[in-house]
Amino acid sequence: MAKKTDMEGLVVPEHIAIILDGNGRWAKKKHLPRNAGHAAGAKTVEKIIEDAHNMGVKYLTVYAFSTENWNRPEEEVKALMKLLRNYLKDCIERANKNDMRVRVIGERSRLDADIVDKINELEECSKNNTGITFIIALNYGSRDEIKRAVQKIAADYREGTIQNGGITEELISSYLDTGDIPDPDLLIRTSGEIRLSNYLLWQLAYTEFYFTDVLWPDFNAEELRKAIVQYNHRDRRYGGVKS
């Protein structure tokens, strides 16, 4: 990773979550195929990981492919899966070079076996790295995540692992895909859309939101710093009590 960015006087969020939006519109503006937008967006992800690390961010979660994205045209889904394969392959070398730990959240059974193998390899080879933790939400939908967590809790209750009265917010959190990851402090969504799109619904309960009209392939370190500056202007409260 490059030299740390000067963030003097700013409180840097420990965990930033991003909804990467606008790849298709970016390509359309440049009279390029949508797949070119996705490829440009993937390069932006690589840059923002480094920028976030240099600013002192500890966890970065990106919404790469949602459970609803399967409804896109078949050719676009195929192109996205091809791009994902290449990204995962390159990410293994990049993770070890940059001391980056990588986690993938989401439901894996619908993904092809070779993609799941690469995910497992990537997580295993980077698990002891101590730099930024990069979390990829892949075939992820928050309602699906909560459903799977409830199913696991019900099964453990039937087996007696969970006793009466043992279901707490902390227990539910531990059964989510992000069970060992702190909740995001800041959510960024690009391209001017103002909605959560089934992303980290449980985890975002007290997260600050930042929306920008910038399309994802054009998002850069300066835009990330703008979001963090805005975060610093917020009066962080939990149930009316300052954090």
Image (cartoon, grey):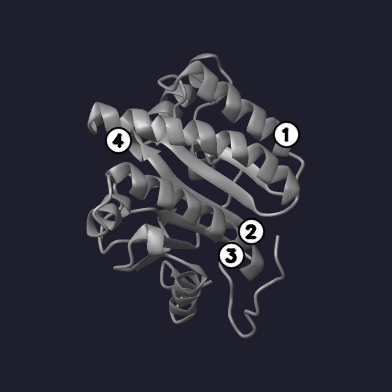
Where residue 69 is drawn, which disc sits there?
4
Residue kind at label 4, given as amino acid type: Asn
| Sequence-wise first label, 2 or 3 | 3
Position of 146 relative to 224 (above/below): above
Residue kind at label 1, given as amino acid type: Cys
The residue identified by callout 3 is 51
Mark 3 → mark 1, Cα distance in angstroms: 23 Å
Mark 4 → mark 2, Cα distance in angstroms: 28 Å
| Sequence-wise first label, 3 or 1 | 3
Residue kind at label 2, given as amino acid type: Lys
Find residue 149 and report its horizontal and vertical position in percent. Answer: 45, 30
Please tell me whether mark 3 sits on a helix, a strand or a loop: helix
Q: Quadrant of residue 118?
A: top right
Where residue 58 is drawn, which disc sits there?
2
Find residue 89 and report its horizontal and vertical position in percent. Answer: 60, 33
| Sequence-wise first label, 2 or 1 | 2
